[in-house]
Image: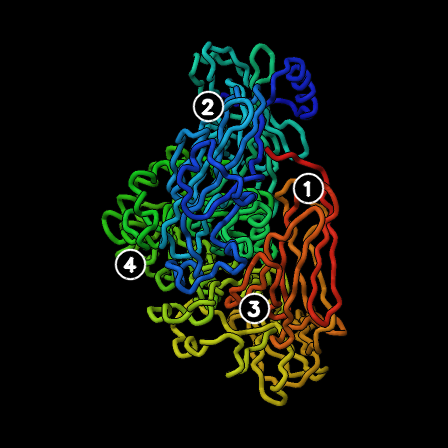
Amino acid sequence: MLPILKTPRLPLAVVLSLALPLALLSGQAAAERRSLAQDWLFQKGDAAGADRPAFDDGNWRKVAVPHDFSIMDKPDGTPPFDAKAVGGQDSGYLPGGQGWYRKHLVLVKGDAARVLRLNFEAVYMDADIWFNGEHVGRHRYGYTAFTLDLTGKAKAGDNVITVRVNHVDPSSRWYAGSGLIRPVTLDLLDPVHVAPDSVFASTRSASAAQGEVDVQASVSNRAAAAAKVELLSTLVAQDGSTAAQDRRVLTIPARGKADVAQRFAVAQPKLWSPEAPNLYTLVQEVRVNGVLRDTRRTRFGIRTVTVDAENGLRINGKQYVLKGGNIHHDNYMLGAAGAPDADRRKVALMKDAGYNAIRSAHNPASQATLEAADELGMLVIDEAFDMWRKSKRDADYARFFEDNWRRDIDSMVVSGRNHPSVIFWSVGNEIPEQASPEGARTTRELGARIRLLDPTRPITQGVNVDSPDNAPIFAEMDVAGYNYRVHLFGSDHAAHPKRVMYTSESTSKDAFRYWDPVGRMPWVIGDFVWTSVDYIGETGIGWMGYSKDWKELGKYPWHLAYCGEIDATGRKRPAAYYRQVIWQSGIDPVAAFVEQPAGTEDLPDRDYFKEHPELDWSLHDLHQSWSWKGQEGKPLKVVVYAEHPEVELFLNGRSLGRKAVGRQTEYQALYSVPYQAGRLVAVGYRDGKAADRWELRTAGAPAAVKLSADRRHVRANGEDLVYVSAELVDAEGVPVYARDGDRKFKVTVTGAGMLAGAGNGNPMDASSLQSGERSTFHGRLVAVVRAGTEAGPVHVEFAAEGLPVQRVRVDATGRTSGL
Ligand code: GAL
């Protein structure tokens, strides 16, 4: 048993005021993390010899990372989509290929002599890295973080990092992107430091009265002499107060390390939960002879997670159900570039739409995703792989699994285990070996590896085979993920009463059927729809379905899956509103949508789905619009979703009748309404009284553009993003939704920022995502603006023929010098 450490609450300022002057007096540089986002040079295709420092990279293109070279327009400005791309429907007709990056890293003498750790959060894929001409690393998997130790290899002045990416197609069942797709950073440390990957803060117990936090860490000594080291560990609450503290003295041999295990007691902890995502920071300060050598900050949360078939999922002892969505990693108009703000926005969009859980399909989530989930209170299933030894596509990770899975599992767990949002580790998805003894054996192996690094979290994976074939593999897991198998929950429970189950993938059109057992069967703890946010690749599955014939559909220029309940630009589609209602989330408690009249579809091939209703991923063809020119007098099907027990629909003030709504009607009321322009209003009644309303209005011709920016201030760090949405409205401000109102825009960014991308969510509009020339789709267009590295105003302009030009100003403040 570890001794429990307690301290009275000391403001952090006091702790820092004691530490800082010493560090300053000593002239020692404090531990530092530098972003290497800026000033990379890029060359597509082979660039033999570029690993040599003296290589002439003068005509390479300057790019910022995260960067995805598959999404970039070709040098002649034409879009990258290619009907003949090897990845085809899988990749959204976007090619992989080889790409080279070089970065000149200028270091002053003192910095070159420090412990240097170069961190890549993900490089897709099969990356080779050289530093000053020396081959320093190879990393095969495209989604896991890795670190290269450059200590002793750097010199004062110019150093060159070279990365070769070798993305051989076809490598993936969805759009993966290519290149330095997640952040790159450099840690500059003292020889005596907390080993960054060694830190693990976990909750042993948590109640309102007390939390027990276990911390394990190693302190490294890279110096040639032994060191007597003081490690001061402080748990700091969000308000800056000290929640607990421990001081230890360690003697660390030369070129050795010392492991530390501590247990902290926190009185009246502010527990982390989806509704109150309270965070703490573990601050570890390392001193030698009283001089501060290293400070490491690790954010974590105090919370417990348990699962069992009687009580379901409990966080801090309280029962939760997983209102989940699957997401892929791409950011649509930015491609697979995992810009932290873009990743964060996806989490926020889901939170705002009532989801409380994310399944990171089918690869480890980015740090930005996990940080956002920590801050917003989203639960995450972090998933390792889509395949193990047997490939799903010719050039996928199966080629590398045998030699690499240990380091990739380690990377996922080490980089994810301090995030309170991560509740389960998933070892795979629909793995080809899943029904064989090998599948069960590999699950056991992967699980054992995970438990070595994190024994606190349940292990799961998504399985899509029926009983009894799924029994051996489920027996190796703590929680059973069922892909599209709601029909098994009753019978599998009878056969395996202790099994905890959830739907790891479901179809949106069957939302009610998949949600209904959740919680009512206590062993069924949640449902994750495929997908919550739309993505590039698996083209057209949300429109014309998915079957063996699907490959004949979803042809270029299709490039989006179009099955996302939130579209690629972030707009909620009707399916998202329905889910909010069946979850009784209180967000838009009543909402009405109109079915597209037969024969008027704005995208082709829909009939295929109608003839094959058994095909799954297609969403209902519903629209948030009451503009149906040409349908006058014809009956339109209107669907009202409501949390209320009763709804009433009105057309131009005339009641179309009240209807009872509830579980028995799957929270829907259907109306047939002869079309007449005007106002369609749905009212939800509670206790006989009108409680909420929803209105659709017929729009006239577009007369103006309404802009909304998700922020007006950015840091001039070359990384912050602003999302600016443009919506067409008529003379009275009514949104224009009908396709004949769509307008072609030119988006221009001037001043202290640049256009990072613009998209409209149209799954068939394969025009450039970077040029800023793009039409609206159902009246909407979203541009992404990236801050530059100089402070100043950023001007964003939207211009469409015949409409007044609209501008928005964003201010970039501060200044960061790149490396
Ligand atoms: C599932 C698979 C997902 C996605 C989905 C829709 O079977 O696990 O990755 O492919 O089908 O096509």
* Residue positioned most to the left: 437
The percent coordinates of residue 529 (x first, y second) are: 47, 60
Q: Which badge, 2 or 1, comes first in the chain's sequence?
A: 2
Q: Marks 2 and 3: which is nearer the front?
A: 2
Vertical comparison of 89 with 463: above or below: below
Determine which of the numbered discs, if any, sits on residue 467 in the image.
4
Q: Which badge, 1 or 4, comes first in the chain's sequence?
A: 4
Ligand 1 resides in the quarter of the picture at bottom left
Determine which of the numbered discs, if any, sits on residue 486 in the image.
none
Left or right: 165 in relation to 774: left
Residue type, label 2: Lys
Q: Regarding mark 1 in the picture, which secondary structure is present there?
A: strand
Q: Regarding mark 2 in the picture, which secondary structure is present there?
A: loop
Q: Which badge, 3 or 4, comes first in the chain's sequence?
A: 4
Q: Marks 3 and 4: which is nearer the front?
A: 3
Q: Regarding mark 4 in the picture, which secondary structure is present there?
A: loop
Residue type, label 4: Ser
Spatial CA span between label 2 and label 3: 56 Å
- Does residue 6 appear in this view? no
Residue type, label 3: Pro
Left or right: 729 in relation to 545: right
Q: Report which residue position mark 3 lands on.
A: 574
Q: Which badge, 2 or 4, comes first in the chain's sequence?
A: 2
Spatial CA span between label 2 and label 4: 56 Å
Q: Marks 3 and 1: which is nearer the front?
A: 1
Q: Marks 2 and 1: which is nearer the front?
A: 2
